[in-house]
């Protein structure tokens, strides 16, 4: 039986009709320029203002730098050894970015994902404009632009956004093809196949699994089970295989056992066992998805109160199934990390935008009030960043910090009051604009001195690497002057960041220590390390490797360890 084209109901009487001056080119240009400025501030400004963070960013950046340097575009290498935990798309993009910048850096490593996030939001705007209205498209783009998971992962040198952006674009293209029914041209299905192939090159077969789960739910809600045979159109299958398959085949030919390592160990074992030590409760992703769209968390009240009949409509049903597929799938995983459900966030953003537009003329106040209070967290969090990053024993209690910084409380209160005013008066456009400006201002503040310097020293290993390079020169990593250099109990993120700057590994403290050496370790681990050495060694702190931008003692310490008392 042929399936008729899917028809979305019109936006309805609540959809604002832009008239008079709002239809003028000047108004539209003004809105467009404003959104571009917000996009630059949120996604692109200050990408290199602080070093690579966490254990993943410096490793992935180092792999891309090695790829650009060696010209081996098949096998990713980390410190000379094949690294086959993730597919190759991010490394390709970052290596090209490194080449265009002529040097591997935090900015060049983060740029590909920032551009992918921008492309995803641009696609979301045009998709919602096509399916609903320009107003819905603008809402979706602005909510997405200011949602914490979008700009945080969009500014990160990891594979999560590299998966999510093509996956989201593929899901949008797939819906456009499904909506046309049996008379659909293959164009949108072919676009979806290419996008899903790129997502497969970013993180493996999980893209196909999540897409299939979403389509199963959509077919169950709408009764359109006949869509399944049509999905396997020869042109779409061929395009998918042409884009995705060659690298996997070449990777296996160049690295015997790659299929087992990647598909079994990195996918099946990660899903079925806790071998990677990321256990979380089954309900873990419920609060995570609420946090993912911060400060729009309160707006989840709109789809929750929309009524079940709304989800019989094709667009609402599709977005709901797309949103739930990653959450449900990864809830059954034994290993859970917040970034796993990033592919659900574009669907959440679009669903919030569509449900808000449905009731735009009479938006319920309580979701807006909740998000207004959450928005007040932004200036407070920015202002208190130095306190959170302080590692010395001189850090004041939190209550004392608030007492000494009444301006922080005042600024947060003003932001909350402004947002509450717009919420109570149902000034939806002003409310959205204020929230986006607030988030963009917060991001800009974090990427400018002195906060960016505090983040760099407190969370990244690059300042340590730069200090080692400046004070020890080309002798590293084996020695600094006449003394060998080791690390012991050093935070992984700090260690990998320093190694990224140095372009080489730092040796761990050996089982048979030398008679005289320098040891770099986390400040909090200095005393346990000294006690573990016992009476056979004398350990003394050294004023070395302190970056000039450090305003207080850095979170690492250098000790000179000598045999004997």
Image: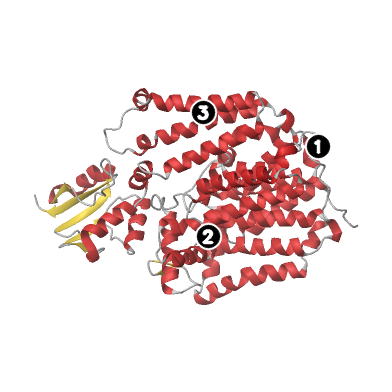
Number of dots carrying numbers: 3
Mark positioned earlier in the residue sequence (1 or 2): 1
In the picture, the quarter occupied by the N terminus is bottom right
SS type, badge 2: helix
**Rendering quarter of residue 184:** bottom right
Q: Residue at the spot x=52%, y=36% of the render? A: 438
Mark seen at residue 12: 1
Q: Is residue 366 above or below residue 350?
A: above
Question: Residue 251, how many percent across, how many down?
Answer: 53, 72
Question: According to the image, what is the colour scheme of the structure?
Answer: secondary structure
Judged from the image, the secondary structure of the residue bearing numbered disc 3 is helix
- For the residues labelled 3 and 1, the Cα–Cα distance comes to 32 Å
Residue 415 - label: 3
Task: Tell me the number on the disc at residue 21.
Answer: none
| Residue 326 in picture, x, y percent from top left | 63, 49
Q: In front: 95, or 530?
A: 95
Q: Residues within 10 Å of mark 2 (few under 14, many from 20)?
A: some
Residue 150 seen anywhere in this rendered image of the structure = no
């Amino acid at each position: 039986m042929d399936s008729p084209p899917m028809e979305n109901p019109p936006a309805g009487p609540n959809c604002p009709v832009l008239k008079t001056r709002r239809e003028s080119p000047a108004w539209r240009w003004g809105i467009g320029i404003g959104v571009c400025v917000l996009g630059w501030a949120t996604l692109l400004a200050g990408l290199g203002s602080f070093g690579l963070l966490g254990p993943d960013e410096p490793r992935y950046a180092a792999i891309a730098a090695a790829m650009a340097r060696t010209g081996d575009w098949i096998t990713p290498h980390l410190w000379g050894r094949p690294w086959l935990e993730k597919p190759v798309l991010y490394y390709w993009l970052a290596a090209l970015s490194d080449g265009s910048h002529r040097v591997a850096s935090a900015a060049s490593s983060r740029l590909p994902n920032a551009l992918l996030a921008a492309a995803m939001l641009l696609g979301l705007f045009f998709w919602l404009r096509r399916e609903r209205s320009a107003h819905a498209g603008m809402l979706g783009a602005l909510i997405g632009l200011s949602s914490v998971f979008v700009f945080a992962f969009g500014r990160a040198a990891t594979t999560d956004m590299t998966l999510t952006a093509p996956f989201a674009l593929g899901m949008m293209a797939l819906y456009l093809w499904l909506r046309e029914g049996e008379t659909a041209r293959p164009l949108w299905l072919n676009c979806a196949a290419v996008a899903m192939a790129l997502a497969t090159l970013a993180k493996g077969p999980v893209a196909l699994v999540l897409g299939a789960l979403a389509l199963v739910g959509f077919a169950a809600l709408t009764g359109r089970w006949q869509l399944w045979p049509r999905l396997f159109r020869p042109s779409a299958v061929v395009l998918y295989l042409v884009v995705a398959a060659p690298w996997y085949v070449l990777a296996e030919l160049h690295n015997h056992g790659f299929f087992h390592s990647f598909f079994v160990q990195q996918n099946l074992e990660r899903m079925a066992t806790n071998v990677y030590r990321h256990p979380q409760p089954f309900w873990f992703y419920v609060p995570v998805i609420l946090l993912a769209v911060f400060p729009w968390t309160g707006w989840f009240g709109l789809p929750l109160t929309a009524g079940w009949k709304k989800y019989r409509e094709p667009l609402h049903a599709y977005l709901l199934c797309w949103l739930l597929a990653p959450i449900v799938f990864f809830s059954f995983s034994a290993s859970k990390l917040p970034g796993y459900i990033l592919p659900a966030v574009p669907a959440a953003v679009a669903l919030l935008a569509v449900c808000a537009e449905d009731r735009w003329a009479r938006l319920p106040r309580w979701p807006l009030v909740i998000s207004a209070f959450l928005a007040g967290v932004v200036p407070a969090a920015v202002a208190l960043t130095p306190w959170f990053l302080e590692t010395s024993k001189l850090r004041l209690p939190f209550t004392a910090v608030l007492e000494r910084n009444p301006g922080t409380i005042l600024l947060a209160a003003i932001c909350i009051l402004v947002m509450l005013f717009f919420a109570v008066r149902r000034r939806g456009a002003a409310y959205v604009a204020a929230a986006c400006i607030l988030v963009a201002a917060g991001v800009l503040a974090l990427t400018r001195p002195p906060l960016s310097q505090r983040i760099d020293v407190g969370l990244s290993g690059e300042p340590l690497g730069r200090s080692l390079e400046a004070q020890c020169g080309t002798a590293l990593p084996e020695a600094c002057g006449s003394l060998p250099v080791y690390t012991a109990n050093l935070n992984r993120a700090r260690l990998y960041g320093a190694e990224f700057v140095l372009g080489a590994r730092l040796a761990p403290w050996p089982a048979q220590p030398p008679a005289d050496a320098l040891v770099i370790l986390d400040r909090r681990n200095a005393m346990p390390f000294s006690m573990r050495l016992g009476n056979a060694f004398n350990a003394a702190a050294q004023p070395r490797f302190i970056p000039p931008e450090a305003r207080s003692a850095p979170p690492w310490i250098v000790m000179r360890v000598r045999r004997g008392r």
